[in-house]
Amino acid sequence: MGNELQLYCLVSNLMANAIQYKPPGGSVVISLSTHNRTATIAIKVIGLRIPPKE
């Protein structure tokens, strides 16, 4: 349960940030899963990153 407008703003902001800050040649994967009246949205940026040791 949630406020439709606030949920829309949250998800659209997360998607816009993922697209804006993805590395060159990278991609953004967005998935939605539902189970028992619960929705899970995952936004993942795929691409080269700074190595952990640095």
Image: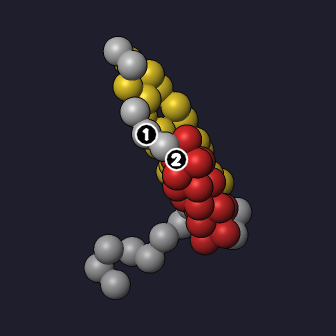
Asked if labels 1 and 2 touch by Cβ distance under 8 angstroms, the answer is yes
| Total marks placed | 2
- From the image, which quarter does the N terminus lie in? top left
Q: Residue furthest top?
A: 36
Q: Position of residue 53 (x, y in %)?
A: 29, 79
Colouring chosen for the image of the structure:
secondary structure
For label 2, the SS is helix
Residue sitting at x 47%, y 26%? 33
At label 2, counting other C-alpha atoms closer than 10 Å, the crowd grade (few under 14, some 14-19, many 20 or more) is few
Check the image and report above or below for 53 versus 7: below
Q: Position of residue 44 (x, y in %)?
A: 50, 51
Check the image and report above or below for 31 versus 25: above
Q: Position of residue 52 (x, y in %)?
A: 32, 74
Q: Residue furthest bottom?
A: 54
Q: Which residue is mark 2?
A: 7
Residue sitting at x 65%, y 61%? 16
Amino acid bearing label 1: Gly
